[in-house]
Image: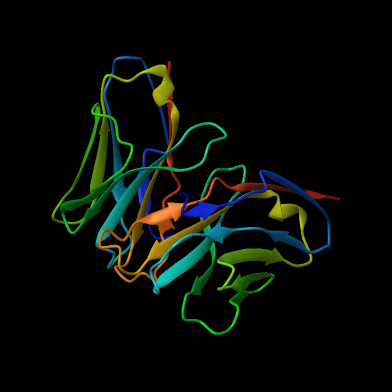
Amino acid sequence: DSGVTQTPKHLITATGQRVTLRCSPRSGDLSVYWYQQSLDQGLQFLIQYYNGEERAKGNILERFSAQQFPDLHSELNLSSLELGDSALYFCASSASSWRSPLHFGNGTRLTVT
Amino acid sequence: AQKITQTQPGMFVQEKEAVTLDCTYDTSDPSYGLFWYKQPSSGEMIFLIYQGSYDQQNATEGRYSLNFQKARKSANLVISASQLGDSAMYFCAMREGSNTGNQFYFGTGTSLTVIP
């Protein structure tokens, strides 16, 4: 158990809809990262938050947004969903040291129909 | 330039044999960490092993060891005595010390299949 909690585990929705993915980081970790993994693809970095503030942005679409709350949990909002947004979305957290690994949640498998 | 390069899209190994998964990295930062992750078909990402740039010895965790060659900028994962449960995707990643964003750079992964 990584200590990172992601909900929901599965999500099926229609094109054009909006969904929210939720993540609770490991206790003590201030950084939260979001990744997208499409079928048989590698990990695409979306966005990182550190202690409530956006720290880095990757290949995140304008239709996607995220935030980290004072209790350090984070939400990833995906809107105007398209078929191509179907993917496994990971949340991960880490301590600040460069020696610290990323700890991943189990992911949310999003299917857009 | 790619920060992390994994040149083996797919690998096969006989059960009980050892296998080496290649990873090369690119950084000018003297402080960095190298990490390997396993992703089985069920989808979760499992942290396996860590090697720091200042570590003099190769990291080991059970059947996993890291062949760290700093001058060649390689950090290959060695899995000894392969088991059927080792069949999975394996990702190499790096984190730089001076990177204020503390970003993780991932390779494209290697798919390992263990043959009975």
Q: Is residue A67 above or below residue A12?
A: below
Closer-to-camera residue (A106/B89): B89
The residue located at (60%, 78%) in the rendering is B58
Query: Which image quadrant is residue A45 in?
Result: top left
Decide if residue B109 is in sight here. Answer: yes
The residue located at (43%, 15%) in the rendering is A113
The residue located at (64%, 64%) in the rendering is B77
Colour treatment of the image: rainbow
Query: Which image quadrant is residue B10 in?
Result: top right
Tell me residue A6's x, y (percent).
Answer: 36, 46
Query: Which image quadrant is residue A111 in?
Result: top left
Closer-to-camera residue (A8/A49): A49
Tell me residue B28's x, y (percent).
Answer: 40, 66
Lateral position of residue B10 relative to residue A56, left or right: right
The residue located at (16%, 54%) in the rendering is A52
Decide if residue A1 is in sight here. Answer: no
Tell me residue A94's x, y (percent).
Answer: 34, 62
Q: Is residue A2 above or below residue A59?
A: below
The residue sitting at the left extreme is A70
Lateral position of residue A27 relative to residue B95, left or right: left
